[in-house]
Structures are given as C-alpha cells and as structure tokens.
Image (tube, rainbow, N blue to C red):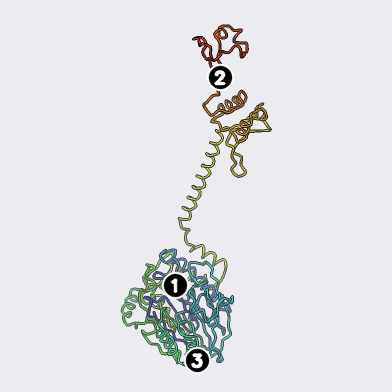
Amino acid sequence: MRYAARSDVGRVRAKNDDSAYVGLHLAVVADGMGGHAGGDVASAATVLDMIHLDKDDYDGDAETVLADEIQTANSLLSELVHMNPKLAGMGTTVTALLLAEGKLHFAHIGDSRAYRLRNGEFEQVSVDHTFVQRLIDEGRLRPEEAETHPHKNVLMRVLGDVDASPELDLATLDVEPGERWLLCSDGLNYVAGHVVERTVRETPNLRECAELLVELTLEAGAPDNVTVVMLEIAEQTTDEARTDAVDIVPPPTASTVAAAVSESPARPGGSSFGAAKTPDAEPKSGDADKAEGQPAGDATGETEPGTSTDPHLGEHLSAEVLREDLAGRPHELVGAAATAAETGSIPTIAGRTLARRAATVLTHKSEQARDDTEDYKPASPPRRWVTVSIAAAILALIALGLWLGYAWTQTRYYIGEQDQHVAIFNGVSQRLGPIQLSTLETVTDIRMSDLPEFSQQRVRQTVPARDLYDAQRIVKNLERTGTTAPAGECITPSATPATPDATATPDASSAPATPGETASPGAAPTPEASPAPTAPFCEVAK
C-alpha cells in the first residue's frame, strides 16, 4: 500500500475521538464514542492493539486473524471499563483493510466508511450499521432523507462494553494494482458524495487528496471530528521494508534509557511516526493531525512507565516498546492514537503480555483461547452477590409473612352450613387462590330448615367467632332460640308476671299459667306480685 492520512478535531468538538493507522499492509480507521471520558480511549486502544497486524505472512489465514484481533480489541475495551467504571458506555467503530498474500481482507463495524475506485468505478464497499440505514434497507426511508433524519447518528452495531461478541462485516476481495481506497470517519459525511468522488478521482497525489478532503470538511462547518486515510495498491518492490508483528523488547539498560531520554527532544512533533516515504506522499510533520484536548489515555488514569517490568507478568506494552516497534516500519498514525503514543498514555491492560496476546491471536487454537480467557477474565463484581442476597431475603420475608398470616387464620372459627346442617369451621371463610383457608371442625344436629329465615341467611353468610368456645355458644343459641347472639351477649326472654301463690307452692310453679290467673290491669297491685325474670340461657348452659 502507498498511503497518506490526516485527522482533524473539527470546528466544534473539544477533542479528537478519531484514530487511524496505515502502513504497507494494514489500514484502520476508528471513530470513538462515549463523550468526554471514553471516545478517544476506545479508538486509540483499538488501533494500537491492531498495529502488529501490519505484515504479509499469514499462511492463508489472514481474514480469521483480522476478525479475531478486532474481537480481542473488543474484549480489551470491556476490561478497560472494568478497571475504570467512568469509561462505561464507551465504544468505537472500526473499518480495516489487510493486504496479505495477494488478497485484500475487509472488516467493518459501525458507520465509518470504505470507498473503492477501480477501473473508473467509484463505490462504497462498507454498509453503515445505523438506524437510518436499516430504514433505507427496509424501504421505509429514501437515501436522500437520511442526511436530515434526527436519528442518523444512532449506531446499531459497535465495538465496546455493550456486546461481548459483536457481529462484523467480513469480506475477502480481489485486488488490482492501481486501485484506490478511501477510509474515513463519519465526519466526512458533511461533504457531498459527488464532491468526495470527484476529489478522489481528480487528485493523483494521495497526500494532497487527504488534505483536500479534510479542508472541504472544515469549509462545510466540521461539526464532528474528521479522519481520512487514502491508499493505493502498488506492486511491492524488493527495497521496501517488511513489517513484523510486535515483539517483546528486552528491558533497556541504563545507558539505553539515557540515550532515549537525550534523543526524545529531537523527535519531531506531529501525529505520525516514521511516516512512509512513498513516491507520491511526502510526510508533513505536525499537520497530519490538528487534534486538541486531552490525551486519549488520560481517562484511564494509568500511564505505564516505558521500562517497567513484572517478573510474573512479563513485559508490558509501554510507550517505549511501541515507539521502537513503530520506528522500524513505515506507517502513519493519526488522531487520538498518535496523541496516546506521543504522550506515553497507552490504554492497555496491565499483565496482558505481548507474547501471550500474540499466542492468543495468531495461533487460533480454541483451547489456548479458552485458557487465556480464563486467565484474564475479570472477577465478578460483588454487587451481583449483594443483589442475590437482597432478593433472597425479600423472598424469605414474604414467605414468613404468608406463613404467619395462614397460622393466624387457623386460630379463628366461624359458623356455616354443611350438608343442610349447621357446622363449625376452623379458619376464615376465604380462599387464597386454590388454597381454602378453613377446615370443617364439626357438623351439628341442627337442620337449617328448623331455623327461622333470617337465621338461615346469617348462617349461610357465616357467623364469625373468636374461638371454639365462642362458636359452641353461638350453636347453643341457635339450638335453643333459633337466633345468633353477638359475641359476649346472651339471649334473655321477656319477663312473665306471677302470683304470690304461684311462687309459694311448687305445684303452682309447675302448672302452666292461664289467662284467668293473670292479674287484670285494673287490679290493685300487691307487694308480693312482682315480675320475676328467668335466668339467661347462657348462664343456664354454664
């Protein structure tokens, strides 16, 4: 690949969330999202994790390697969120091309775009994973309406901590010398499509083409970051440097560190390291990326020293290791990834050694992948156990409340009807779903037909009692008087007058009273002839 890259923060945003890398065999554009905290971290971490793919030797497995590395970058973002919860919700798009063994391997997720110009035909190869694109595919929206749709920036697929295994668009394409590719973030969408096509067609110099596309975006207002990677397929010459995967660099000695420190001020500024010196692209220091704002790695709160080592975990991927690797290959690195590499704020996972990561990605053995996943699987957050404990406690309290309520109902009694007879029931005359809250205690000999009508109605509607003794008292009242008495009261019949003789002699008390024996209203009252009420039935029963 011959290439040129440019990234700009735009005229509205405070920092650049885009990242891009392009070399002889690899081109990647990532557009981060996640607001102030995590957009630049997501794109920089993804691009920096993929740069070791910039090589040609894959033994026919390049497409699998590319897909696996993007999935690995996705897990890296999840681990970064686990380490720093403030990054929750961050994500990034990825559009990548890998030129290996005479084929061009394409991988894509999100709304960054890939265009190809071959044999005079300019076409968009990628498909936007957006809500409006889905509406267009379903015929519910016209393409010209998509640019003004209020939800045009809503993504349906993206890398990040939202999906453990995101779905990628993958393809292996035939490649021809001379064909051109344009990879860009969605910030370029503010330039009309026909203007983009004309610029790519009519600008032979790749550097000038990338610069012109960014300038056109700035003239259109540039409300978003914009990143452009232009590349052209060319025949490889013998004098072009080969690129290898990132290897573990031995710990530098004190003299090496001193030399590196002394040389660091002389390193030119800008966003690209070792930019490719291709015939049609002269590197321009400092203008390839005009991003402003915080470095991408600052949000993670972790800046690994360039020479730190851990005897148990091996060499960490540090800024010094990254710089030494990038210095040995022609490339351009722009956007948040370039800022992270320059400042030494590399968003990586401590303990993720290069050798182990390379073994996971490049061997493609399921057993090894499973072992590495278990080694670096983050511990389950303790709040899950807290939630389970709280739920179990709530269920236990509900069960205890239901049991206590049922136990209370079994201390109650009531009078009801059973087989046309008066019966005593234990419990309450209610049902809890299929559960009957009462049981039959006893059936009396009192027939319902022998009771007055109003007493039958009361029994059928059930008569509550405080306890078994109270229920037996009510049954006695029904048996003697045919009525029920309220709890704590007794049925007392009306008083009947009696004569002194009747009260004096046992024979008179046992004889029934006749109308002639009763005192007339006009008779003079005597002290002996006073009403004598009969004792209450409940006391007689006692």
Q: Which residue is mark 3?
A: 201
In the image: residue 364, left or right of residue 338: right
Query: Which element is circle 2 on?
Result: loop
- Which tag is nearer the camera, tag 3 or tag 2? 2
Q: Which amino acid is tagged 2? A: Lys
Q: Which amino acid is tagged 1? A: Met
Earlier in the chain: of badge 1 and badge 3, it is 1
Front one among 304 and 251: 304
In the image: residue 339, left or right of residue 418: left
Query: Which element is circle 3 on?
Result: helix
Residue 181 placement (x, y as % from top left): 51, 86
Q: CA distance from mark 1 to mark 3?
A: 31 Å
Residue lying at 50% horizontally and 50% vertically, measured from the top left? 391
Q: CA distance from mark 1 to mark 2?
A: 88 Å
In the displayed structure, would residue 482 be above or below residue 524?
below
Residue lying at 52% horizontally and 74% vertically, measured from the top left? 130
Front one among 105 and 235: 105
In the image: residue 363, left or right of residue 12: right
- Which tag is nearer the camera, tag 1 or tag 2? 2
Q: Which amino acid is tagged 3? A: Arg
Q: Which circle marks residue 33 in the picture? A: 1
10 Å crowding of disc 1: few (<14), some (14-19), many (20+) = many
Front one among 39 and 261: 39
Q: CA distance from mark 3 to mark 2?
A: 115 Å
Q: Which circle marks residue 542 in the picture? A: 2
Earlier in the chain: of badge 3 and badge 2, it is 3
Residue 37 placement (x, y as % from top left): 39, 69
Q: Residue furthest front?
A: 522
